[in-house]
Image (tube, coloured by chain):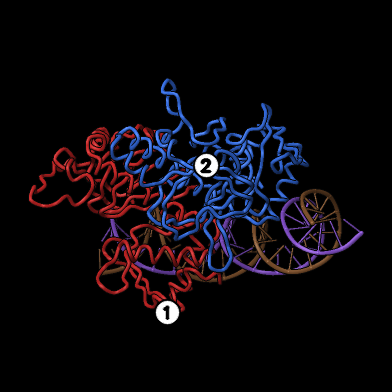
Chain colours: A blue, B red, C purple, D brown
Amino acid sequence: MFVSSQLIEIGHDTPHAAFPPLHPLAALDATAATICFDKDRTLFAEGDPATYCYRILGGAVRMVKQMEDGRRQVVEFLLAGDLFAINAPDHHSLTAETVIATTVCRYRRSAVEALADRDPATARRLRALAVAELGQARARLVLLGRRTASERLAQFLLEMERRAPRGGAGRVVLPMGRADIADHLGLTPETVCRLLTGLRHDGTIGTGRGIDGAEVMILDPDALAALATAPRH
Amino acid sequence: MFVSSQLIEIGHDTPHAAFPPLHPLAALDATAATICFDKDRTLFAEGDPATYCYRILGGAVRMVKQMEDGRRQVVEFLLAGDLFAINAPDHHSLTAETVIATTVCRYRRSAVEALADRDPATARRLRALAVAELGQARARLVLLGRRTASERLAQFLLEMERRAPRGGAGRVVLPMGRADIADHLGLTPETVCRLLTGLRHDGTIGTGRGIDGAEVMILDPDALAALATAPRH
DNA sequence: CGAACTATTGAACTAGGTCAAACCCAGTGG
DNA sequence: CCACTGGGTTTGACCTAGTTCAATAGTTCG
């Protein structure tokens, strides 16, 4: 769904013509800036003019909708390789914050739009990206609207395994804290905690801490997959 | 699987060349078919190849994600004027069903894609549409993830008022039943009912039945708007 | 070591769900 | 014209998944 390249490119790339572009904006890499952020920085806030869009080289970002009274919804997490803020209206409707120290490649949206107008292939790819994001968002609607807490967490772990694998075995990096996970799944941090404890107790997962945050080891993928679609508490 | 029964081909549109295009696919109206469906018909099901896309001339459609065990999420309702299934992957990930008797204008997606490739303006409009849908979906994520039952219903009524006004006053047509509303808001039909009764009791709304389904009269828009963002039960 | 977090665990509570009965029509048929 | 049927809607009584509140335990960093 998200473009995920394992490569870590730093600085201004000069892609070899021999290689196919690695991501839809490769043609603009020469004009893109590489920027590093600390943990918990705001890349842009709701209401800001959407001047730039971003590709994550390393780290993690959360897209957040903040409510007046403090309730929060983490609309999505973005990981290394992910492109974001391309398919946005001209003023952002979400806030983007780093979860941990993060390096991004920043593109000027006007340049992207110009490229899309002149190159139908790019236009098609950007639309395909929007369609993919839309599909993701809708899948998440079902998650929040109709699935139980344990189904949500199990699906989240499996999704993270797919997107942020660490080594071959079922090792998953969770750079975000419990509160972020809770705000992503429409739960409370306490519930997330209890569910994780339950899974650990059942021998379905193991937990520990790695270099970039907590890690989860999926010990029984089948059990987890079963939980992800079973209404059972 | 397409078009099970009770469909009537009405013919091909003959748009007046003198008028500016009223919607992004106006250029294709000459090749589009107008089709009528009964209540509760399936336009396409999850997994079907996405051969066509649609514009609603009259009626209402629900986009549904059906789960193995019978739970359902109504991802969105589509009303007269709405365009849908354009920004879809090549196989549908949702089922589209009519809520009431509905007339649609059907376009071949291959023709739409071809138009987009040759005309950057159309490509831009389609992408803008995808971006708008994405924004909608994300707003709904917050609704399902972080808002209470009464906030959800109040917001739904206000949204329907905006989209399906009837006459000048706060009169809203609700072509769909309680179960559909519940499956849209992540609630049960009973809860929807109780909330509506509560609102009627408070004098915030009035309910009755019109020609095309139930109607709600918004008597106190301010109270409803307040409810839509207040966590209070 | 101590401050400031974040994670974990426990106990009590409640929003909303579940189950079940009553109600209200619209349509059908006598 | 009225009774009958079958679907959705409404209401009530009870229940539980998940929240809330509160206390404890790691972890990180100075």
- x, y percentage for residue B207? 37, 71
Crowd tier of the residue under label 2, counting other residues whose Cα lies within 10 Å: few below 14, some 14–19, many 20 or above: some
x 66%, y 54%: residue = A179
Q: Is residue B71 left or right of residue A225?
A: left
Q: Nearer the viewer, residue A21 or B221?
A: A21
Residue shown at 22%/39% (left/top)? Answer: B119
Select label 2 or label 1 by which is in front: 2
List the residue tagged with mark 1.
Answer: B203
Q: Which mark is residue A34?
A: 2
Across and down, in percent, residue B67 comes to 50, 42
Q: Where residue A178 sits: x, y (%)? A: 68, 51
Quarter that holds the N terminus of chain B: top left
Residue A39, compared with residue A207, is above or below; it is below
Which three-letter amino acid code belongs to the residue tagged 1?
Answer: Gly
Q: Amino acid at mark 2?
A: Thr
Which chain's residue wears label 2? A
Note whether residue B34 is visible. yes
Q: Secondary structure at mark 2?
A: strand
| In the foreground, D24 or A56 | A56
In the image, is A220 to the left or to the right of B132? right
- Near-viewer residue (B38 or B195): B195
Residue at the extreme top of the image, as rendered: A18
The chain to which mark 1 is attached is B
Q: How far apart are labels 2 and 1 at the CA level?
A: 57 Å
Q: Is B3 situated left or right of D20 in this image?
A: left
Can residue B233 be seen here? Answer: no
In the picture, residue A111 is in which quadrant? top left
